[in-house]
Image: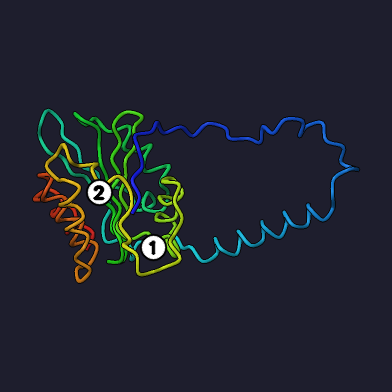
Amino acid sequence: MADSSDEEYDLGDRGDDRPGLEDADPDLVDEDVELDDEDDDVEDALEDDDVEDALEDDIDFIMALYREDGVPVVTPLETDLANDLDDLIAHLQRLPGDNGASALVSISGEFFAAVRVRGRHVHMVLSDVYAAENWSLARDIVDFLGIDVPEDDDEDGLVGDLDLFADQGLSEMDLEAICADWDEDSDTLALQIADEIHFGPQARKVADSFS
């Protein structure tokens, strides 16, 4: 299980700034190193081929939750946002929530993600880290959290900021207890979270609209 600290979300340029790289003489570059780099690129591409975007039929629901003047509001989101964490975060940042906005996404009954944005601070939970081996949203979240998928598939799959809803009445311990119920589908678990943070009726109405 991994917790990530508060961090500012920044999509700025992350170019290669290694000193002296721009001055390197191409005639002195080791060709074997270039081949190794190409092999790594091919390997990465093959790994990415195993990760799929969720199709519309795969998406149990994707919704935004926020409070406006203290009133809970839940709205359905475009299904394309279930495959792009960057776009999902950008969308949440534009919502007029009193204390930021959150999203709940459930994919194919297999895993759910909860993302909360407050200004430039982003927190998220992934119910099953092993979903990153198959689904693009889960892979994006694992990359954002800066963690690896464990080699031992017997480990607990819940990762992220487990206290992201603590101020709304859902403690880290209670979130763990919800996610420990492996007999329930991910959409059911995500709606239990909505209940705990007092968005239950509105979230269930939106979830039904995806049926």
Q: Residue at x 60, y 64 (%)?
A: 46
* SS category of the residue bearing label 2: strand
Q: Is residue 39 left or right of residue 159?
A: right
Q: Residue at x 66, y 36 (%)?
A: 16
Q: Is 193 rendered above or below residue 89?
A: below
Q: Relative to the observer, which residue lies in front, 10 or 105?
A: 10
For the view shown, which residue lies furthest in the bottom direction? 183
- Residue type for callout 2: Met
The residue that label 2 is drawn on is 63
Distance in Å between CA atoms under marks 1 and 2: 20 Å
Q: Is residue 179 left or right of residue 6?
A: left
* SS category of the residue bearing label 1: helix
Q: Quadrant of residue 39?
A: bottom right
Q: Earlier in the sequence, mark 1 or mark 2?
A: 2
Question: How far across and how far down the image is residue 118, in percent?
Answer: 28, 32
The crowd level at tag 2 (other Cα within 10 Å; few <14, some 14-19, many 20+) is many
User: Which numbered mark, 1 or 2, is in the foreground of this view?
Assistant: 1
Q: Quadrant of residue 54?
A: bottom left
Placement of the C terminus among the 4 image quadrants:
bottom left
Residue 131, numbered label: 1
Q: Quadrant of residue 18?
A: top right
The crowd level at tag 1 (other Cα within 10 Å; few <14, some 14-19, many 20+) is many
